[in-house]
Image: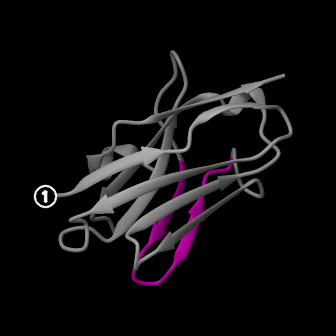
Amino acid sequence: EVRLVESGGGSVQAGGSLSLSCAASGYERGTNVMAWFRQALGKEREGVAAIRPSSDSPYYGDSVKGRATIAQDKAKKMIYLHMYRLKPDDTATYYCAAGLLDSGLLDPSGYNYWGQGTQVTVSS
């Protein structure tokens, strides 16, 4: 069973930085991509970043490119999202996800497993 638990959300001022963590278990079999998504109030879920655990290859959504880094610690089974130069538009609930995909890594419809989410609020 795949289990994903996010942590690290909170409130931060615009221009600041924040790191999110995802404790993952059971994902080694049946998935080949780990990702972060976010959903702001009234908006669709958006792909933020994805990584292939086997190759460490990162992928980023246009809205965070250059302001985010996705990383993994295989030994600890952790996935991280480090975000910089935060903007009020980054305010959302952030979700960790795992899936088995060959393409469309930032499309939420391809992911089978989701965490419960962690709230990030960026104030101006």
The magenta segment: 48-62
Q: Residue at x 76, y 46 (%)?
A: 17
The answer to which quarter of the image holds residue 59 is bottom right
Rendered view: 6 above or below 1: above
Residue 16 belongs to the span the image colors magenta: no
Residue 46 percent location from the top left of the image: 51, 39
Q: Name the residue under label 1.
A: 1
Structure colour scheme: one colour
Which amino acid, by three-letter code, is at mark 1? Glu
Rendered view: 67 above or below 8: below
- Badge 1: residue crowd in 10 Å (few <14, some 14–19, many ≥20): few
One can see residue 104 in this view: no
Residue 57 percent location from the top left of the image: 53, 77
- Left or right of 26? Residue 103 is right
Secondary structure of the magenta portion, mostly?
Answer: strand
Q: What element carries label 1?
A: loop
Rendered view: 36 above or below 46: below
Q: Which residue lies furthest to the left in this view?
A: 1
Q: Residue furthest bottom?
A: 55
Placement of the C terminus among the 4 image quadrants: top right
Placement of the N terminus among the 4 image quadrants: bottom left
- Left or right of 17? Residue 110 is left
Q: Which residue is drawn at 38% across and 57% down?
A: 23
- Left or right of 77? Residue 61 is right
One can see residue 84 in this view: yes
Q: Residue at x 68, y 34 (%)?
A: 90
Q: Which residue is drawn at 50% across and 71% down?
A: 72
Residue 8 percent location from the top left of the image: 55, 44
Q: Which of 34 and 44 is in front in this view?
A: 34
Residue 22 percent location from the top left of the image: 43, 54
